[in-house]
Image (cartoon, rainbow, N blue to C red):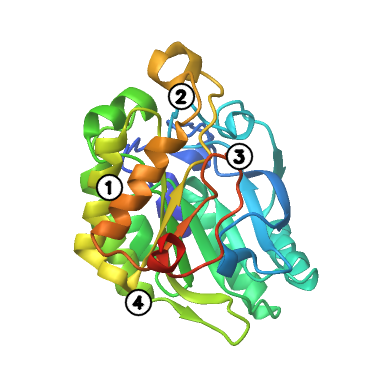
Amino acid sequence: DYINMLKNCNLCIRKCNVNRLNGELGACNSSDKIKAARAELHMWEEPPISLDTGSGTVFFSNCNFRCVFCQNHEISQENKGAFISIEELSNIFLRLQDKGANNINLVTPTHYVPQIIEALKIAKNKGLSIPILYNTNGYDSLETIKALDGYIDVYLPDFKYFDDKYAIKYSKAPGYRDNLLLILKEMYSQVGPNKFDEKGRMTKGMIIRHLMLPTLLFDSKKVIDTIYNIFGDNVYISIMNQYTPMFNAFDYKELSKPLNPKLYDSLINYAAEIGIKNAFIQESGSNSTDFVPSFNLEGILT
């Protein structure tokens, strides 16, 4: 329950065991108080997430990951944001719904899951009815994902790395892949294959995101392979090319340059070759966040 989850915090697999109710801070640098940086309609997610009116996105402050290239480092690593109560968070959800949001999109939510569940209970009692999205780096504990059963309609997990050496080197995240595979299966068991309403809005399911990094084509292929071998076309794979060197990326020679469009194209071609149909890709070479609005990878490439 809410109290126990914060009293001995194991919400992610760092398992800090700190008592956040007493103000103790673990790796995510968060107490029992929710901190959030932004709440707004966001137009640049995958097409069935944003559609025409946008995704009701709540960007939570702090993070249990330590990505050296983080594009949101001011929020994730530098503690920017404002404290809000559980009641205030529930009101934010309702205001986003009133503004026409297609969904509530919880960004970097892992370390606030107990509070989010309480806020969702309050908001749903007051009429919150749009789908709830859980947008995570994938370092959640299995127990945390199980606690979300019934509260989340669409999971948006990252699959950042296949090889643990990269997870450790670039995100200080040992055991990343093995844990992620456990929680992906749990997520899928909760929401099942993708479902859409008459407008094309995603109402149930999972989109697994992979941000391709410079020089890591082989690792990216292993990520794609793994997802497709487990889930086939029952989930969507979002293959992103928007990597831009930021934050501490310049300390790593291989990460200090943008992604080569040819590498990205070769990954997309590989995905098509192994038979993936349900994927989102981004316009190659543009480093834009615009996704090609198609559900059929084969149709994009032929």
Amino acid at pointer 2: Val
Name which residue type carries label 1. Answer: Val
Q: Position of residue 51 (x, y in %)?
A: 65, 69
User: Mark 2 or mark 3, which is nearer to you?
Assistant: 2
Task: Give residue 127's position: percent from left, percent from top.
Answer: 69, 80
Quadrant of residue 102 within the rendered picture: bottom right
Q: Residue furthest front?
A: 302
The residue labelled by disc 1 is 223
Where 78 falls versus 290 (above or below)?
A: above
SS for dot 3: loop
Q: Is residue 225 left or right of residue 1?
A: left
Q: Which residue is mark 2?
A: 68
Q: Position of residue 145 (x, y in %)?
A: 36, 60
Which of the two marks, 1 or 2, is nearer to us in this view?
1
Q: Residues within 10 Å of mark 1 (few under 14, many from 20)?
A: many
Nearer the N terminus, badge 3 or badge 1?
A: 3
Tell me which amino acid carries mark 3: Ser
Q: Residue 277: x and y, percent?
A: 35, 68
Q: Secondary structure at mark 2?
A: loop
Give left or right: position of 182 versus 14.
left
